[in-house]
Amino acid sequence: MSFTLAIVGRPNVGKSTLFNRLVGKRLALVDDQPGVTRDLREGQGRLGPLRFTVLDSAGLEEATDDSLQGRMRRLTERAIEAADVCLFLVDARTGLTPTDHALADLLRRRAKAVILAANKAEGRAGEAGWLEAFGLGLGEPLRLSGEHGEGMEDLLAALTPLA
Ligand code: GDP
Ligand code: MG
């Protein structure tokens, strides 16, 4: 059984880092500098027994934090269309922004299924951001650290019934 998972979220929340962990190859560029990756990247993801197509939505770097610009909206809409499940990442360290709320609205209206995750949640610094993410109205957020590989069992548990 196979499905398509799209990783969505505003720039810099850690989408490409998590994509790389799931795909296990450096197919998506990760950089501290926004503006490196473009468009939708596709790879073959693995998590526990699951095998799936994973999309990394990039190319959002020109969207400002205050507005959901056309390009970001169009790209996220494409990812939503292509995906059976959207993994919506927010940054547990910076907290929510207006863009996160706008993306949450888009996902709530359009996505077939959404898994919300507070990423960068390793250590104590992510606690407040994780709690804040409940306010997006997309259920209990997972606590993930794509960089450190934390929360992958919870991600597997969330994906399994949708696979
Ligand atoms: P993207 O723009 O959403 O694709 O984000 P990237 O994957 O390129 O990551 C943006 C920045 O966040 C980089 O500096 C990453 O090293 C950092 N980052 C990604 N995942 C984590 C994480 O789990 N924890 C922390 N602390 N930093 C992370
Ligand atoms: Mg990226």
Image (cartoon, rainbow, N blue to C red):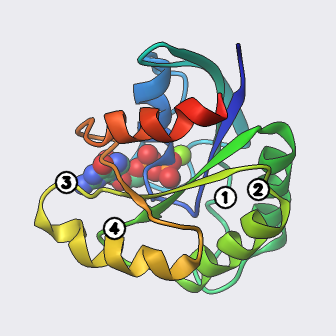
Residue 60: image tag: 1
Instruction: Describe the element under mark 4 as helix, strand or loop.
Output: loop
Residue 92: image tag: 4
Mark in the foreground, 3 or 2: 3
Q: Is mark 4 within 8 Å of ligand 1?
A: no
Q: Residue at x 72, y 29 (%)?
A: 4
Residue lying at the far front of the rendered structure: 161
Q: Is mark 1 within 8 Å of ligand 1?
A: yes
Left or right, residue 38 beside residue 70: left
Which quarter of the figure is the C terminus placed in?
top right
Q: Local crowd at mark 2 within 10 Å, few (<14), some, or many (≥20)?
A: many
Q: CA distance from mark 3 to mark 4?
A: 9 Å
Q: Residue at x 54, y 61 (%)?
A: 11
Q: Earlier in the sequence, mark 2 or mark 1?
A: 1
Residue that numbered label 3 is attached to: 122
Q: Amino acid at mark 4?
A: Ala
Q: Earlier in the sequence, mark 4 or mark 2?
A: 2
Q: Earlier in the sequence, mark 3 or mark 2?
A: 2
Q: Tell me if label 3 and label 4 are in contact, CB under 8 Å.
A: no
Q: Is residue 75 visible?
A: yes
